[in-house]
Image (cartoon, rainbow, N blue to C red):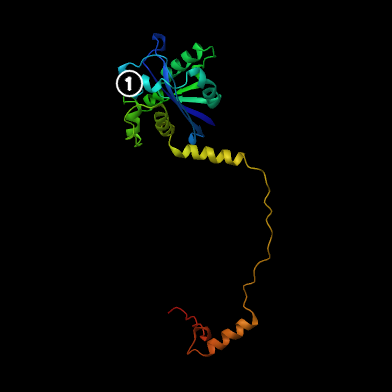
């Protein structure tokens, strides 16, 4: 089972108001566990960076000015996600921005059915509790002390750990991984060679050596007679 944990950073809240995507981060999961394969790109939004957005992710217009356009990274991005399920925290937000960028360059958009919203999962599991990423990291004791600002790749890595906890912890993934390993067996038959039982009786030489040893002992236990059973009184 391949899944992609995905996060984006943007210049604002609404792509219909001219806001653009500035960063994409993806983490590949196999049977719910990270494989180590990631996708990460900064994207030139071709516009200024509002102060409110800069305070969130720290990406300035100057920093992004020499980064590739979305049209230049879209093929690599789509190749990486393939047809896998996209695990996203507040999926509607990220999907709207991705689809706005895809539509802008004439690419087919991604259906919402491709995404799994971990905010909805968290609210269903913990009604009334905070469902933001920091709160979930605290709940599941996931170290996020290095998260001083939002970052698409870092947030995807943290979300991968949160997602694993939301679905029940590490054990389900390990069971699935074990099942997959079993189904992917090469089918090689291991030949078991039948070996004759090893002899455990002492040889004549060993018996003679033992008798000589016992003969040197005073009242050895090997020569004692077992006590006779006495009838009960």
* Residue furthest to the top: 17
Which residue lies at the image location 35% right of the left edge and 30% below the top edge? 136
Residue 230, given in percent of the width and then of the height, sits at 47, 81
Give 186 or 208, whichever is nearer the viewer: 186
Give 1 or 67, whichever is nearer the viewer: 67
Position above or below: 170 against 148 = below
In the rendered image, the quadrant that contains the N terminus is top right
Residue 232 picture quarter: bottom left
- Relative horizontal placement of residue 142, taking residue 74 as reference (left or right): left
Residue 167 picture quarter: top left
Which residue lies at the image location 48% right of the left edge and 18% below the top edge? 70
In the rendered image, the quadrant that contains the C terminus is bottom left
Give 67 or 179, whichever is nearer the viewer: 67
Which residue lies at the image location 51% right of the left edge and 20% below the top edge? 72
For disc 1, the marked residue is 54
Residue 150 picture quarter: top left
**Label 1 packing within 10 angstroms: few (<14), some (14-19), many (20+):** some
Residue 141, given in percent of the width and then of the height, sits at 34, 37
């Amino acid at each position: 089972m391949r899944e992609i944990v995905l996060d984006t950073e943007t210049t604002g809240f609404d792509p219909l108001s001219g806001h653009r995507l500035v960063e994409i981060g993806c983490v590949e999961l196999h049977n719910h566990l990270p494989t180590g394969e990631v996708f990460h790109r900064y994207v030139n939004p071709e516009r200024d960076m509002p102060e409110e957005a800069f305070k969130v992710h720290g990406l300035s217009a100057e920093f992004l000015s020499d980064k590739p356009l979305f049209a230049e990274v879209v093929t690599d991005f789509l190749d990486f996600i393939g047809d896998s399920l996209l695990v996203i925290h507040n999926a509607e937000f990220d999907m709207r921005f991705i689809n706005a960028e895809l539509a802008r360059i004439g690419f087919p958009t991604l259906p919402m059915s491709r995404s799994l919203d971990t905010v909805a999962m968290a609210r269903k599991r913990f009604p009334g509790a905070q469902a933001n990423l920091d709160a979930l990291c605290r709940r599941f004791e996931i170290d996020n002390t290095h998260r001083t600002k939002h970052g698409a790749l870092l947030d995807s890595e943290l979300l991968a750990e949160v997602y694993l906890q939301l679905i029940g912890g590490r054990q389900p993934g390990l069971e699935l991984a074990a099942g997959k390993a079993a189904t992917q067996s090469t089918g090689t038959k291991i030949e078991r060679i039948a070996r004759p039982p090893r002899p455990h009786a002492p040889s004549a030489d060993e018996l003679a050596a033992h008798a000589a040893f016992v003969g040197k002992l005073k009242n050895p236990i090997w020569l004692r007679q077992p006590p006779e059973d006495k009838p009960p009184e």
